[in-house]
Image (spheres, rainbow, N blue to C red):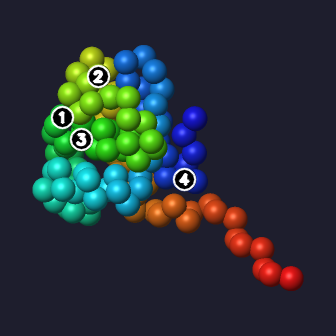
Amino acid sequence: MADVLRNEVAITLGGAERTMRATFTAIRAIEAAVGKSLIALISQVGANGDLSITDAATVIYHGLRGADDKRLTLEQVGDAVMEAGYSKVSIPVIEFLSSALNGVSVGKPEPTPAQ
């Protein structure tokens, strides 16, 4: 189950609920694969809804890996996106991209002072 306080977003692929997590490694890999920064990608999506199926699959693939789910290859994720339908996966992808801006410290309990 996805934990929003850990920058996790649930997505259903192939009839199974999976979890994507926005980690530094995942975001760095997404930026390298799509050839633009996270901010530029989010701006592109926000400005005109422009998110290619390839970019969506790339975000999902690396997001899954951020949550230590390495069961699917990029091709299998792409096939699952096509099977599920782009409209059903685009919302969790956008939620994932947005969550990356909030940082994983959101909602973390404050450290207990030393006694």
Label 3 packing within 10 angstroms: few (<14), some (14-19), many (20+): many
- The residue where tag 1 is placed is 53
In the image, which disc is placed on residue 79? none
Q: Which residue is mark 2?
A: 80
Question: Label 1 amino acid?
Answer: Ile
Earlier sequence position, callout 2 versus callout 3? 3
**In this rendering, would 16 be left or right of 14?**
right
Where is mark 3, residue-wise? 58
Q: Residue at x 27, y 17 (%)?
A: 83
| Residue 12 point in image, percent of width and height | 42, 26
Q: Earlier in the sequence, mark 2 or mark 4?
A: 4
Task: Name the residue located 38 percent from the left edge and 29 percent from the top edge.
Answer: 71
Mark 3: amino acid: Thr
Q: Nearer the viewer, residue 71 or 109?
A: 71
Q: Residues within 10 Å of mark 4 (few under 14, many from 20)?
A: some
- In which quadrant is the C terminus drawn? bottom right
Q: Amino acid at mark 4?
A: Arg
**Kind of element beneath mark 1:** helix
- Sequence order check: which comes first, mark 3 or mark 1? 1
In terms of depth relative to the viewer, which is nearer, 112 or 99?
Answer: 112
Q: Which of the marked residues, 3 or 4, is nearer the chain's N terminus?
A: 4
**Cβ atoms at labels 2 and 1 below 8 Å apart:** no
Q: Are marks 3 and 1 in contact (CB under 8 Å)?
A: no
Q: Nearer the viewer, residue 2 or 112?
A: 112
Three-letter code for the amino acid on which mark 2 is drawn: Ala
How far, Cα to Cα, is label 2 from label 3?
12 Å
Task: Pick whichever of labels 1 and 4 is earlier in the sequence.
Answer: 4
Alpha-carbon distance for marks 1 and 4? 26 Å
Inter-mark Cα distance, 2 to 4: 25 Å
Give the residue at mark 4: 6
